[in-house]
Amino acid sequence: MNKLQTSSSYLLLLILFSATIFSSCSENKTSKTQELESVENEPVEKESKKTILFFGNSLTAGYGIDKEDSFAGLTQQRLDSLGLDYRVINGGLSGETTAGGFSRLDWFLEEEPYIFVLELGGNDGLRGIQLSETRSNLEKIIDQVRSKYPETHIILAGMQIPPNMGQEYTDEFKSIYPEVAAEKNVTLIPFLLEGVAGNPDLNLPDGIHPTEEGHQIVFETVWPYIRDLVTNS
C-alpha cells in the first residue's frame, strides 16, 4: 500500500471515529435533556393543610394562660394526636367586639378556612352595646365569610352574660345567637362556657376568663362540632 492510500485510509478511519463520538455525545445530550424535561414536568406535591379558624376575643385568645392551653390550642393537639392533617389558626384578640371583628375580618380571609368558628359578642354585652348592632355585626361577619368561601363550614359559639345590664337585656342578648344561627343556617354551639361560667375554680380571679382546667372543659364542648366535620370530610 502506497503512502497516498495509507493516508486516505487513516483519514477515513478518523472521520468514522469522530462521527461515532459525536453520535454518542448527541445521544447522551438528548437523553439528559429528556431526563431533565421529565423531572421538570413532574407535578410538585405541595403541602396543603385545611385550616380551622377560631375568630373571637380573649376567650379564644386564651387570656391569662399559654395559648396552646386555650380551647383552640387544645383542638390542634387533638387533631395532631388523631393524625388529622388540619391547621388551627387562633384569631382571638382580647377586648374584641363584634364591630372590631368585622373590621379586621378581611385580613383573616386571605386563605379559605375549612371551618370558621365565630366567638364574638361577649364584650358587646358587658359594655351594654345596642343589641341590634351586635346582631347585625354577627350577621355581616357570617355573610362575608359565606360570600367569599361558600363551602366553609361556619360554627357560631353562643354566649351569655351576667344580668348587670338588667334581665331584659340579658335575656335578649342570649337569644341573639340561636336566632342568628337559624336565620343564617349555621351550626350553633348553644353556650360556649357551659359548665365553666360562674365557677370560681375554673376561672381566673377576674371571674370571666377560664383557667387551663376551664379551657379543657370548653374544648370538650367545642370538639364534637369540629370532630363531626373533620372526620367526615
Image (spheres, rainbow, N blue to C red):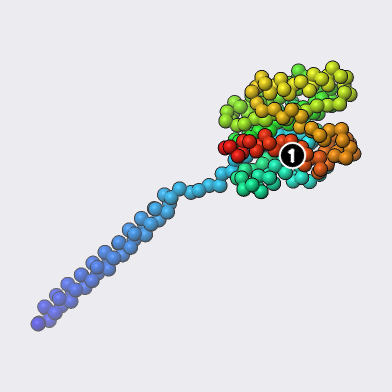
Please tell me which residue is depicted at 79% across the width and 46% down the height of the picture. 66
Q: In which quarter of the image is residue 189?
A: top right
Left or right? Give the position of 165 relative to 97: right
Can you see residue 231?
yes
Please tell me which residue is depicted at 79% across the width and 32% down the height of the picture. 194
Q: Residue 63 at x, y = what percent?
A: 81, 40
Question: Counting other residues with Cα less than 10 Å from the Cα at mark 1, is it few (<14), some (14-19), or many (20 or more)?
Answer: many
Q: Quadrant of residue 147?
A: top right
Q: Residue 151 at x, y = what percent?
A: 57, 30
Left or right? Give the position of 164 relative to 91: right
The residue closer to the viewer here, 137 or 153, is 153
Please tell me which residue is depicted at 24% across the width and 68% down the height of the picture. 20
- Residue named by callout 1: 219
* Amino acid type indicated by mark 1: Phe
In what quadrant of the picture does the N terminus appear? bottom left
Left or right? Give the position of 18 relative to 42: left
Q: Residue 43 at x, y = what percent?
A: 45, 48
Q: Residue 182 at x, y = what percent?
A: 67, 21
Please tell me which residue is depicted at 40% across the width and 56% down the height of the picture. 36
